Amino acid sequence: MTLIWLEFLLVVALLELTPGPNMAWLATLTLDKGRAAGMQAVLGIALGLCLYLVAAIAGLGALMAAQPQLLAGLRWLGVLYLVYLAFEPWIEQARQDRKGALPGEEDHSGYAGQHFMRGLTLNILNPKAALFYVTLLPRFVEESGEHVWLPSFWLGLTHIGVATSVHLAIVLAAGGLRPWLSAGKRRTYLNIFFTAALLGIAVWLAWDGIAHPV
């Protein structure tokens, strides 16, 4: 089991360091609204991963694997949600301009836990997370030769720990850069860049879904 865990840890580290919807959105959110919002989103994403882990242990992963249309539906909902998130900074900036908010000022608009819920929603609709618990995790569990729920639990916790560490690093780094990047016209350029990044990921997910339907 130790060797399998080390192999799993390496695969997870490479997977989580690959750019995806969560990484792009966390950087965008933190640079736009601050570290507090980014931390809320990290917690929401972590809860989403925990829900996928519980589903995998309960056998729902096998059900999703047998019903590929469910994964396809998640993919397209995720694409639509990414498009919405891509244009959200522009909507919020327009609101702040009307209110006279200062550039780089912490944003406390919206209801409590708003960013937590958006992180949770984005991760549940993230096909990368869904496919991980439907396809990749069961392969390592089968190789372990132990009771299904126990290796699923420990391997799942390993994945959640690595993913959350990467997400926290992104939020902390983006929070440190925020005062400089949010000043003057750099804020507008930043919004353009991340809007393009999120739209690019949405287009890639859509194209991948068409080229390789699950």
Image (spheres, rainbow, N blue to C red):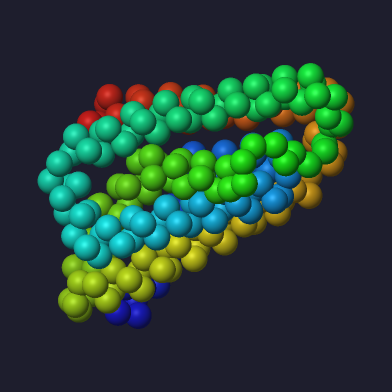
Residue 87 in which image quadrant: top right
Residue 194, percent from left and from top: 63, 30
Choose between 16 and 98: the one closer to the eye.
98
Q: Is residue 143 visible?
A: no
134 sits left or right of 48 in the view:
left
Quarter of the image for the N terminus: give it: bottom left
Residue 45, percent from left and from top: 49, 51
194 sits left or right of 33 in the view:
left
Residue 196 in which image quadrant: top right
Tell me what residue is drawn at x 42 percent, y 63 percent: 159
Q: Where 168 falls versus 107 (above or below)?
A: below
Please, which residue is most extreme toward the front here? Answer: 111
Tell me what residue is drawn at x 27 percent, y 26 percent: 211
Residue 149 in which image quadrant: bottom left
Tell me what residue is drawn at x 38 percent, y 40 percent: 125
31 sits left or right of 146 in the view:
right
Residue 35, percent from left and from top: 71, 50
Q: Is residue 57 visible?
A: yes
Q: Where 119 falls versus 96 (above or below)?
A: below
Choose between 83 and 194: the one closer to the eye.
83
Quarter of the image for the C terminus: give it: top left
Choose between 51 and 177: the one closer to the eye.
51
Q: Where 187 falls versus 159 (above or below)?
A: above
Please, which residue is most extreme toward the left here? Answer: 66
Tell me what residue is drawn at x 15 percent, y 50 percent: 63
Q: How many tags in the picture?
A: 0
Choose between 197 and 125: the one closer to the eye.
125
Residue 123, percent from left and from top: 44, 45
